[in-house]
Amino acid sequence: MPFDDGEDDDAPVGGAPLPPDDRLWRHPSELGASADPSFAASSAATDASGTRLWAVAVVAGLIGSALSLGVVAVAGRLSTEVVEKPVVERVAVRPVAELNLAGASGQGVIAIAKSVAPAIARIESAAEKGKTVASAILVRTDGYLATNAHVVAHLAGLLVVLADGTEVTGRVVGADTTTDIAILKIDRDDLPVAVLGSATELESGEPAIAIGSPLGPAGGPSVTVGVISALGRRVSSSDGVELHDMIETDAPTAAGSSGGALCDGSGSVIGMTTAISTSSDAAANALGFAIPVDIVRAVADDIIATGSARHSWLGVEGADVDAANAKDMGVTGGAKVTKVADDSPAATAGLQSDDVITSLDGAKVTSMSAFVVALRGHHPGDSITLEIMRRSGPQTMVITLGEKSHG
């Protein structure tokens, strides 16, 4: 149905016009024909003059508008504080696994390797036992790299070889043996950096791509492909330090690739590869292990800011809640507490054995591994809110984290 606003479109707008003598304008039909040439010339001159006046007015208006806009733009720039960040970190907004394993040897892996390789560097160091070769991940554009602490221990010198072949002298900013993470610094800016994802939502069976630089630019990156085979593993580094909450993958870590990147199917870094298990089991030695990137980021932030890493302490041990207990308690998953340390923040807050932690600061907890990784993102003195399921029913508690002793 046509829209009708109730008005007559043919009706004069504003009523009948005023008499000609009372108006500042005339319609040509009201002027009539004039035989006087001077009248015609006068009319033509008047029209030309009017046209020029209109043109001048339009141009002046445009110039005035432009000047006004210019003043506004300048005023806007002067009134807006512009802060330039000296460094850039690339963090994935939604790290997801998108790689189709059926084509794991195809273009998907090649594209990811080409994308990540510029942010992977080779480390050459003169150690007490001879030359050491490893890899590192560029995490900030101003020259900060993350690698394994055992790689840079007892160094006499450090050379960083970038993906384009540039050789730069590096220095150790700090190292944390508890997590086997070290942060290096080179005096370079505008460097390509890796996209850092998260390991908190990882599941066994997701694709995994390990990328290192054991041979440097001449040999190209080392790329191995597999899946996430387990989470929350405990393994020993080559220095004999027990590492917790590790990602296990059947994408092995090539010699010299320790300190490189473990990526998901979208190319986001989900972990930093480290030493393989020291187990005598040949099958175990074929596996690769990686430190969750969330832990790498937290330790890196501490070391860059203070030169050392601080570790928060809750004071619990636990495991994934099993299916039977989950069904019995009416939860879909969580971290089951198996032990609470005496005089710990957890004990002070009233956390008990057999409690199932289902949420940390509003974020769902699906496993003990995910809980520990999320907890590593907090610092001593932080207050966290836990939602737990107890036999008597759900409870919420606020706990202030302590600091883990290195003794």
Image (tube, rainbow, N blue to C red):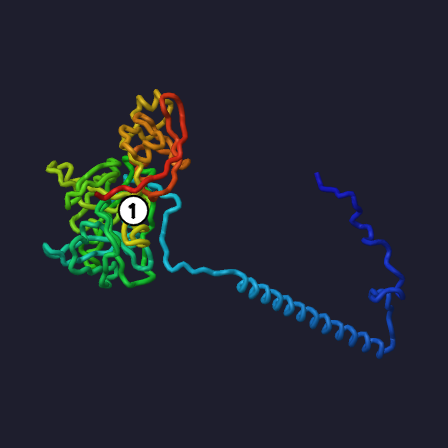
Asked if residue 363 shows in the view, the reply is no
Q: Extreme bottom residue here?
A: 38
Residue 157 versus residue 32: which sits nearer the camera?
157
Q: Residues within 10 Å of mark 1 (few under 14, many from 20)?
A: some
- Res 390 → quadrant: top left
Quadrant containing the C terminus in the rendered view: top left
- Considering only vertical position in the picture, is 390 above or below 115? above
- In the image, 173: left or right of 378? left
Spot occupied by residue 254 in the image (x, y as percentages of width and height): 17, 47
- Considering only vertical position in the picture, is 251 above or below 44? above
Spot occupied by residue 165 in the image (x, y as percentages of width and height): 23, 62
Q: Amino acid at mark 1?
A: Arg
* Residue drawn where x is 54% and y is 64% of the image: 78
- In the image, 169: left or right of 78? left
* Residue drawn where x is 76% and y is 72% of the image: 50
User: Where is mark 1, residue-wise?
Assistant: 310
- Res 178 → quadrant: top left
Spot occupied by residue 243 in the image (x, y as percentages of width and height): 21, 41
Residue 248 versus residue 220: which sits nearer the camera?
248
- Considering only vertical position in the picture, is 35 above or below 99? below
Q: Extreme front residue here?
A: 343
Number of numbered discs: 1
Quadrant containing the N terminus in the rendered view: top right
SS at badge 1: loop
Asked if residue 390 shows in the view, the reply is yes
Spot occupied by residue 62 in the image (x, y as percentages of width and height): 64, 67
- Res 40 → quadrant: bottom right
